[in-house]
Image (cartoon, rainbow, N blue to C red):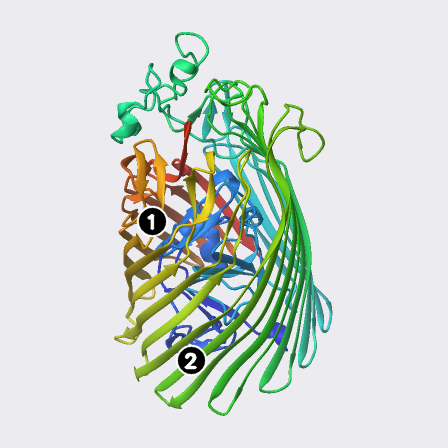
Amino acid sequence: MMGGRKSLLLATAGLMSGLTVPGVWAQDAAADGVSGEIIVTAQKRAQSVQDVPLSITAFGGDDLRRMQANDVGAIAEHVANVVATTSANLPAFTIRGIGLNEFASNFDSPVAVHVDEIYKSKPYMATIPFFDVERVEALKGPQGTLFGRNTTGGSVNFYTNAPVLENGGGFNLSGDNHGRFKMDGHANLVLADNLAARFSYFVAQGSGGPYHNDYTGKDYGAPNQYAGRLQIKWFGENSSIRLTAYGFRDKSELTPYKSPGIFTETGAYCAPLLNGTLDSDRSACLKYGPFAPGTDNSGLRETQSIRKANADYGWKANNTAYGFSMRASHDFGGAELTSITSYDYFRRAQTEDSDNSPYATVNTDYYSRIQEFTQELRLAGKTGRLNYLIGGFYEHDNLSEANSGNTIDNPIAGLPPFAPRLAADFVQKVRSLALFTHNEYELLPSLSVVAGLRYTNDKTSLNGSTYLGANDPQGRAHRVTPVVPVDAADTQRTDETTSFRGGINWKPARNQLIYASVSRGFRSGGYSVPFGGVITEFVPERLTAYELGYKGSMLDRLVTLNAAVFRYDYKNLQVNVDDPTSPLVPVTRNIGSSRTTGAEADITVRPDNSLTLTAGLSYLDAEFRKTDRAITTYAGVIPLEGKRPVNTPKWTAQMGAQKTFALGGDLDLIAQTDARYTSARYLESTGQIFDRAPSYWIQNARVALASSKGWEFAVWGRNIWDKNYMTYLNNVSFFRVEIYGDPAAYGASFSVKF
């Protein structure tokens, strides 16, 4: 019976936690768990990892639990050449320098997020915590011939635990020194011989938090989240149907911004801003210079500590989401037909104090409501030497947004108070149709070729306006009354293209794979709707990727080595930049081309079953090319030609170790640590010294007492040396926004499975 089958994740070395290595999903491994062939499903079929010509990093559910990885940032921390941004609570992955660096929420990310093969179109949909997860697979490079939605940068795919024909359950509980607590768990029930149900839940609560708001005198950063998921699965002889419903509520306090001053007493830009030394003295410059009320600029100097805020308007979420899906499959014998139908609803209502000041200078309200429907249908199988996949995809998004920034106390000349809010109000609809195929043909037992093709037709419409508005937020959406119109649009565009993947795979030996591939990704055009600015339109971007890779193991799998070199040619990049049409708020525009070359390598060494050592190194070299666009900055007008794109550190490195000590009886002591280094990078496209985020490294550690009876108690530390590291930067014309990663956190956790 299907319920009697066991699944095992072998991510480098069994119970590794948070080590950046090429993990794999294994099914029906040999009884000893070591000599059995490792099987992956990265290409939608069971396949030896040695035969997969893709760069993959994967983690299992136990790995994620031990990493405390319920969100995008914690996962990205452990994947080579991947970083995460979280501006305005919009978590997004950047893979090999390709990603989203926006505070606008109507854009799809070039790195897709799929949950149970369902595409989540907007980044804020990834704020739903990842819980009761079976595995995560991060795929690098353009993805379009295997997945419903086409992407240029890659895809991070989450697979939750499905119901099984075996009663069981479990829970995980953890707490840290900042007064934050999390609990998640599941219960699996057999309802009939061929029917099972699974209920999973997640709760995060807190009192206090890792930050302090001097304005209110209270600690800040407490989570307040509830999520639940109910699944029912029917197992037929050759078919299965899986029904899923979920809900989510989030009223958390979000990460505060830092906003160092940028002016002198005369109104000029200050020297520490221009020479890049603001980090050493964040109070050196005035937020609004001589424009500020009073003579001493009281309250308008930034606090030095990045863990302190001084804000009258909190960073808070008031978000609700729910959804339904059905996955049905039928095995015809040699070919499987799969249908995935989904509906997602997400209402996002958030506030932020964009300039972290005790005045209503830039107090911002965000409101988004999206309804997303998707349908994927695919047929996959094998005939003779040919493995094939043929699929179709349909998506319809209906997005409504109302955003405004209250600038009633803003002293800069030319801004409100004559109309105290910069506002935007619009409806955006997206309809996407696609046909795709992915095929691999075996020329010889050791040689195969890959060919994939995708046709995409995307239609995007926009109806809305931008304006200066009154200070009269109304209703749940906090819409405001227009006072001074700025721009309006009632328009649509259709983008269509054919993209592809081709490759050749050679296995010189059983445990060795050399592959070469060329692929093309496509990202549709769209519209940028800034607060109180001019609505702009941008055309599709296209990325062509070339990759040469090696995967191998040697010395009876004592050593595993993986390496890849690649080149990305990017055309019509869609980049968030300052623009003369929108002098106050950045907009997304096409800026020209870029080229990225890079290399990655990682090694895993397992001297015995109790010890695993890993190390990885990644290199990126990238620059803008063939662009005549110049951007206004604090240092004047800067041409983009030759500048380094956002979030492309030259070097990243990972290392880790795990050691298991047998204590006798059924107890083991498991000690592990992992560390990551990220070199300096630019977080704005103009590549000036004030756009630069310094290099950093962080280390995590964990010690656990584990029993073979299914329980585990652990003490752990994240960012144990309390390193400060910047994750987002926005150099707006009249203020500056910085977001930093979490401080050191120490805690304990307890887990049970039964």
User: From where the camera sits, is residue 713 visible?
Assistant: no
Q: Quadrant of the C terminus?
A: bottom right
Q: Secondary structure beneath disc 1?
A: loop
The mark that comes first in sequence, 2 or 1, is 2
Q: Amino acid at mark 2?
A: Val
146 relative to 400 in the view: left or right: left
Q: Residue furthest right?
A: 192
Which label number is shown at residue 654? none
| CA distance separating discs 2 and 1 | 38 Å
Could you classify mark 1 by the number of other residues whose Cα lies within 10 Å: few (under 14), some (14-19), or many (20 or more)?
few
Indicate whether 619 appears above or below 468. Answer: below
Could you classify mark 2 by the number of other residues whose Cα lies within 10 Å: few (under 14), some (14-19), or many (20 or more)?
many
Comparing 555 with 565, the one in front is: 565
Instruction: Give the residue drawn at x 51%, y 38%.
Output: 88
Q: Residue furthest top?
A: 295
679 relative to 231 in the view: left or right: left
Return the x and y of residue 336 as percentages of the image width and height. Answer: 61, 80
Q: Secondary structure beneath disc 2?
A: strand
Comparing 200 with 31, the one in front is: 200
Can you tell which quarter of the image residue 698 is in?
top left
User: From where the camera sits, is residue 374 visible?
Assistant: yes
Return the x and y of residue 351 as percentages of the image width and height. Answer: 57, 32
Location of mark 2 (residue) = 450
Q: Are marks 2 and 1 in contact (CB under 8 Å)?
A: no
Camera-nearest label, 2 or 1: 1
Q: Quadrant of the N terminus?
A: bottom right
Instruction: Give the residue drawn at x 36%, y 74%.
Output: 517
Return the x and y of residue 76 as percentages of the image width and height. Answer: 41, 52
Q: Amino acid at mark 1?
A: Asp
Which label number is shown at residue 628? 1
Return the x and y of residue 415 as percentages of the image width and height. Answer: 50, 23
Indicate whether 539 appears above or below 487. Answer: below
